[in-house]
Amino acid sequence: MSEPTRRRPALNARTAAFVLAVVLLVYFVFAGARAYTMISSGQPVFVLFGLSILVLPVLGMLLLYDQLRFGVATERLARRLDDEGALPDVTHLPRKPSGRVERDAADQWFDQKQAELDADPENWRNWYAVAEAYDLAGDRNRGRKAMRKAIELERNA
């Protein structure tokens, strides 16, 4: 029996981020235009509403910038590790039919990477590996925090 072929996702992460960024940018332009119209009316209630509406696009653009910068920095670290031949390899871990790594294997791999981090907590490569391990375990929040630490340490190295 042959192994089933994996289908490539319709959008990779970079393309999806770009599409979302463009959609959000269009939304921010329309919301900003509406806010400007309300503020320029001069009526106090509309000015307040306009200022309130303007806050959302500004916050959204800041968040979008932060997320895109995070993605670029993460890719930079991955390329650097790949060039060094040190990119964490998870291809040997057993997977479920859905493609996700089996929980016990992910936990075991996490424990191994955590021990390496404990032995050398100032090495950004160890933080990167722990971030990957968190991601495999499904803990995206801790994974992002660990990746931010890896980025910070690599920049300061």
Image (tube, helix red, strand yellow):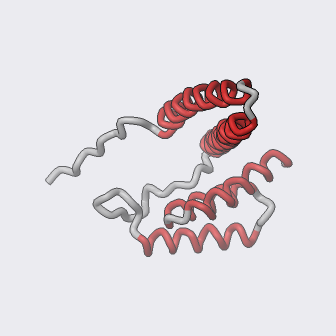
* Figure check: 21 above or below 2: above
Q: Quadrant of the N terminus?
A: bottom left
Q: Is residue 73 visible?
A: no
Q: Position of residue 144 (x, y in %)?
A: 64, 56
Kindly give the residue lying farthest to the front in the view shown: 43
Residue sitting at x 62%, y 50%: 86
Q: Position of residue 133 (x, y in %)?
A: 56, 63
Frontmost residue, 71 versus 94: 71
Kindly give the residue lying farthest to the right in the view shown: 156
Q: Position of residue 94 (x, y in %)?
A: 37, 65
Residue 152 in the figure: left or right of residue 7:
right
* Quarter-of-image position of residue 39: top right
Give the number of callouts: 0
* Figure check: 51 above or below 42: below
Residue sitting at x 80%, y 53%: 153
Residue 64 in the figure: left or right of residue 8:
right
Frontmost residue, 10 versus 115: 10
* Quarter-of-image position of residue 67: top right
Residue 68 in the figure: left or right of residue 138:
right
* Quarter-of-image position of residue 33: top right
Q: Is residue 92 visible?
A: yes
* Figure check: 145 above or below 114: above
Q: Position of residue 117 (x, y in %)?
A: 71, 67
Residue sitting at x 71%, y 53%: 148
Residue sitting at x 50%, y 62%: 136
